[in-house]
Image: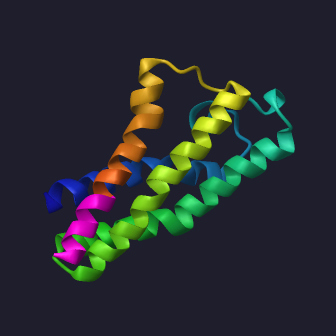
């Protein structure tokens, strides 16, 4: 189970980290808007649109990605600190999903299709809960 959670975390965070790294380097590029942020700046206040999305990109690349990578590596090494770091890294999987759900719902950026609920929204908090529960169990055992 440790391998599933640790490698799953690495795969998800690598995907997110790669996309958000593009957003850090090219925050106003049309590709970034279409493939990373979603929606269009003209759908809302453009300054708020870019600030919200760029803020998440910077936080993800410089805080969340290193935390998840270190946690997964520590878990695979069987180190207690790895499970603690992965437990900490599980939190953003859930809270960012909620923020983006409200953002998408209120601004109509993404339509709630089956793909939206499974890929865009569902897998992130589901993995976060799985990782949190597993790490908490391992830390308290």
| Residue lying at 55% horizontally and 54% vertically, measured from the top left | 21
Q: Position of residue 90 (x, y in %)?
A: 40, 60
Task: Find residue 72 and report its image quarter.
Answer: bottom left
| Residue lying at 60% horizontally and 62% vertically, measured from the top left | 59
Please tell me whether the stretch drawn in magenta is mainly helix, strand or loop: helix
Task: Find residue 77 and report its image quarter.
Answer: bottom left
Q: Position of residue 34 (x, y in %)?
A: 63, 30
- Count every numbered label the image shows and give the total: 0
* Residue 42, above or below 23: above
Residues in magenta?
Answer: 132-141
Magenta span contains residue 139: yes
The C terminus is located in which quarter? Answer: bottom left
- Front-most of residues 77 and 80: 80
Task: Find residue 75 and report its image quarter.
Answer: bottom left
Residue 17 visible, this angle: no
Q: Position of residue 118 (x, y in %)?
A: 39, 29
Residue 115 lies left or right of residue 76; in this view the side is: right
* Residue 107, above or below 92: above
| Residue lying at 73% horizontally and 29% vertically, measured from the top left | 107
Residue 106 visible, this angle: yes
Residue 72 lies left or right of residue 99; in this view the side is: left
The N terminus is located in which quarter? Answer: bottom left
| Residue lying at 24% horizontally and 76% vertically, measured from the top left | 139
Residue 88 lies left or right of residue 62; in this view the side is: left
Magenta span contains residue 19: no
Task: Identify the coloring.
Answer: rainbow
């Amino acid at each position: 189970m440790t391998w599933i959670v640790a490698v799953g975390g690495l795969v998800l965070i690598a995907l997110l980290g790669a996309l958000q790294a593009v957003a850090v380097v090219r925050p106003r590029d049309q590709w970034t808007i279409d493939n990373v942020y979603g929606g269009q700046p003209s759908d809302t206040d453009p300054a708020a649109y870019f600030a919200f999305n760029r803020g998440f990109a910077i936080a993800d690349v410089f805080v969340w990605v290193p935390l998840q990578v270190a946690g997964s590596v520590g878990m695979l090494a069987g180190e207690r600190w790895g499970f603690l770091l992965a437990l900490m890294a599980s939190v953003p999987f859930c809270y960012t999903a909620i923020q983006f759900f409200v953002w998408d719902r209120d601004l109509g950026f993404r339509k709630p299709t089956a793909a939206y609920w499974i890929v865009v929204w569902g897998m992130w908090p589901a993995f976060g809960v799985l990782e949190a529960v597993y790490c908490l169990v391992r830390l308290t055992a």
